[in-house]
Image (tube, rainbow, N blue to C red):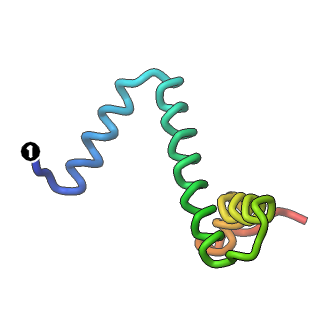
Amino acid sequence: MILMKPDEGVRKQIEIYKGMAGMERLKIVFEMWEIALAQVKASEKSMNPDLDEKEIERRARQRMTADTLCSRYYCCPGPQA
């Protein structure tokens, strides 16, 4: 087993990504999105067991959108009116 500090791990991962084709990196992004979405859906279902699947899906996708995350956690300016 190879142990490394977190910053070394990040640098190594960046090197790996740079060596990949764009489509490979894009595939990884979509897989990560699907994993995160499944986790958020499970969270919504756990917090709201009486909701139907359609509403769980809607809430999960809303939580995953950039506008929601940006305005809630990063104090970015919201969409322009």
Q: Position of residue 60 (x, y in %)?
A: 69, 62
Specify the amino acid type for callout 1: Met
Residue 14 as seen in the image, left or right of residue 41: left
Q: Quadrant of residue 62?
A: bottom right
**Quarter of the C terminus within the rendering:** bottom right
Q: Residue at x 48, y 26 (%)?
A: 24
Residue 29 as seen in the image, left or right of residue 1: right
Residue 81 as seen in the image, left or right of residue 49: right
Q: Position of residue 7 (x, y in %)?
A: 24, 54
In this picture, is 29 found above or below 21?
below
Q: Quadrant of residue 16?
A: top left
Label 1 belongs to which residue? Answer: 1
Q: Residue at x 74, y 76 (%)?
A: 50
**Quarter of the N terminus within the rendering:** top left
For label 1, the crowd category at 10 Å Cα-Cα, with few meaning under 14, some 14 to 19 and many 20 or more, is few
Q: Residue at x 48, y 31 (%)?
A: 25
Q: Position of residue 54 (x, y in %)?
A: 80, 59
